[in-house]
């Protein structure tokens, strides 16, 4: 716990002071991201991908990619949500999981 002291003096010399306690956290944690698509599940046609990404210092941008494609920037929707549409029409259909 740290203490910040503030003192204000008016022209005739009357002085007030206040103090505030505060905590320091200079550890920059890794961002976290949750998807609306379950790993290993099927998606079809055009699927909205929604990512909820958070970070203790704020998330700047979220990207996605499929297979060996290049990363693409997702659309920021506010409140830590990022979206895009994944068009699966150009991807090879997988056989049913047995
Ligand atoms: Ca961070």
Image (tube, rainbow, N blue to C red):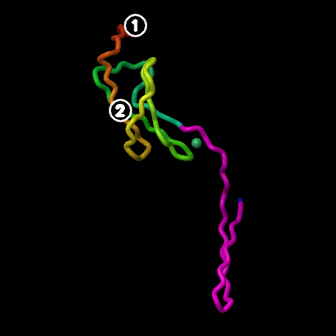
Q: Which residue is mark 1?
A: 98
Labels 2, 1: front one: 2
Gap between marks 2 and 1 measured at Cα = 30 Å
Q: Residue furthest front?
A: 70
Task: State the extent of the magenta-drawn residues as a range.
Answer: 2-31
First in sequence, mark 2 or 1: give its number: 2
Q: Residues within 10 Å of mark 1 (few under 14, many from 20)?
A: few
Quarter of the image for the C terminus: give it: top left
Residue 36 place in picture, x, y as percent = 40, 31
Q: Left or right: where does residue 78 sit relative to residue 44?
A: right
Residue at 67% in and 64% down: 21
Residue 72 place in picture, x, y as percent = 42, 30
- Which quadrant of the render holds ligand 1? top right
Residue at 46% in and 33% down: 34
Residue 50 place in picture, x, y as percent = 38, 34
* Residue 9 found in image quarter: bottom right
Residue 37 place in picture, x, y as percent = 40, 27
Label 2 CB-ligand 1 distance < 8 A? no
Q: Residues within 10 Å of mark 2 (few under 14, many from 20)?
A: some
Q: Secondary structure at mark 1?
A: loop
Q: Is residue 18 magenta?
A: yes
Quarter of the image for the N terminus: give it: bottom right
Q: Left or right: where does residue 93 sit relative to residue 12?
A: left
Q: Secondary structure at mark 2?
A: strand
Q: Residue furthest bottom?
A: 12
Label 1 CB-ligand 1 distance < 8 A? no
Q: Give above or below for 49 relative to 98.
A: below
Q: Which residue is mark 2?
A: 84
Q: Is residue 21 magenta?
A: yes
* Residue 49 found in image quarter: top left
Residue at 29% in and 17% down: 89
Residue 97 or 15: which is nearer the viewer? 15
């Amino acid at each position: 716990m740290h203490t910040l002291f503030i003192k204000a003096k008016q022209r005739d010399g009357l002085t007030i002071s206040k103090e505030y306690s505060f905590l320091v956290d200079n550890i920059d944690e890794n961002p976290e991201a949750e998807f609306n698509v379950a790993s290993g599940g099927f998606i079809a046609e055009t699927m909205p991908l929604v990512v909820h990404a958070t970070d203790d210092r704020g998330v700047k941008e979220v990207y996605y990619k499929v297979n060996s494609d290049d990363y693409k920037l997702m659309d920021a929707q506010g409140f830590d949500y990022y979206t895009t549409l994944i068009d699966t029409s150009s991807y090879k259909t997988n056989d049913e999981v047995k």
